[in-house]
Amino acid sequence: MLLMPESLHAIRWNHLLSVYFLPLASAALVAMFVVWRLHREDLEELTTELKRTKGLAEQRERERDLAQEEVFRRLYEERELNKEKIQFQAKLAEYEKYAALAQLALGAAHEINNPLLGILSHLELELKASSDPERRTEIEQCISGAKRISATLKGLVNYARPGPLILSKLSLHRLVSDTFGFLENQPMLRGKQLENSVPTDLPHIRADANQLSQVLMNLLLNAAEATPEGGRISVSASKLTFIESVEIRVSDTGSGIPPDVLAHVFEPFFTTKRGKGTGLGLSISQAYVRSHNGDIRVDSVLKHGTTVTLTLPIRQDETDESRKEESEVVV
Ligand SMILES: Nc1ncnc2c1ncn2[C@@H]1O[C@H](COP(=O)(O)OP(=O)(O)OP(=O)(O)O)[C@@H](O)[C@H]1O
Ligand SMILES: [Mg+2]
């Protein structure tokens, strides 16, 4: 059979296609498939690796934040500790000063008081024996001077060695109204409004009534001296929220205390009332409040008034009482 040239051509193409092209194309396809698989596996591995690295980076970031927080916390704690250390050192220095002063005061009081009592009794005998009015006035002036020295010494001893606490259950409202009763007729309180804002249902506290009323008296006298006629002096109190203590506030609408004076008001013999005050009122009050394990502080705004705040525990435990008895013997 004779073949046409076109058929020959087609046969050759078919032959070429089946012998070379198709296997080549299949091989290429297989190769592409393999490459694609490899590539995909690589890509998956890469994605997992990327995710792992990202997770690790996030974890490191969290760890860094935590470490930063810890550093800040430590720094803050260190700063607070330093602050406490400074406060403690200042308190220690104050107590050391107080102890030295107390020793000095007790020694001086002892040395002065005995001869003073002798002088006083001698002066009283002289007064009885004398009939000359001029001489009597002179002796009376000497007696009043000696009594003033004796009162100052007594104050000094009270400051240096507050007596052992005689504890009883006290209603603060009652204590304040009794103290107001004592002071009502004092000329320095005339024209000034006295206000007892202590709630009647405030928990009773265990304290030494005599010492506490002396503290109140000192604070009220200071307030009265600083407050002009028409002014107001008030006492308020409340129970503190988280601790078993009460806060008593004595406020006045008086002259206020300049900052340079405020820094010294608890120092014994510090006074701005030359000739009239001994400067022991607040020092003794502080000693009494401290022997109750309490605290006293003064806040003041010049020309507006002053508030003295006492913080006192509601109860005094027995061990503290015995410690106080002991400390009374030691000082
Ligand atoms: N409520 C107040 N208003 C203004 N100043 C005050 C007040 N309380 C105290 N002071 C100031 O504090 C100083 C010390 O007070 P403190 O009671 O210790 O002594 P004093 O009143 O001067 O004398 P004393 O109380 O011994 O008679 C006072 O001289 C006064 O300057
Ligand atoms: Mg006073």
Image (cartoon, helix red, strand yellow):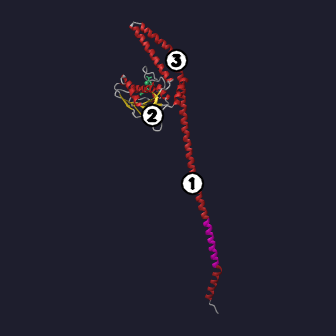
State whether residue 300 is above or below residue 69.
above
Kindly state the secondary structure of the residue where label 3 is placed.
helix
Q: Residue farthest to the right?
A: 19
The quarter holding residue 212 reads top left
Name the residue that disc number 2 marks: 246
Q: Which mark is residue 110?
A: 3
Q: Position of residue 31 (x, y in %)?
A: 64, 72
Q: Nearer the viewer's eye, disc 1 or disc 2?
A: 2
What is the distance, in whole Å, between disc 3 and disc 1 at their CAs? 76 Å
In the drawing, what numbered circle is on residue 58? 1
In the image, residue 31 above or below residue 128: below
Q: Find residue 194 and report its horizontal and vertical position in percent.
A: 36, 28
Question: How far apart are the two marked residues, 1 and 2, measured between alpha carbons?
Answer: 52 Å
Find residue 270 and report its horizontal and vertical position in percent. 47, 24
Note whether 257 is above or below 16 in the view shown. Answer: above
Residue type, label 3: His
Q: Is residue 155 magenta?
A: no
Quadrant location, the C terminus: top right
Query: Does residue 255 appear in this view?
Result: no
Task: Classify mark 3: residues with Cα within 10 Å, few (<14), some (14-19) or many (20+).
Answer: few
Identify the amino acid type marked 2.
Val
Circle 1: element type: helix
Ligand 2 lies in quarter? top left
Q: Residue at x 44, y 13 (%)?
A: 143
Q: Which residues are magenta?
A: 21-41
Q: Main secondary structure of the magenta part?
A: helix
Task: Identify residue type, mark 1.
Answer: Glu
Q: Residue at x 48, y 32 (%)?
A: 315
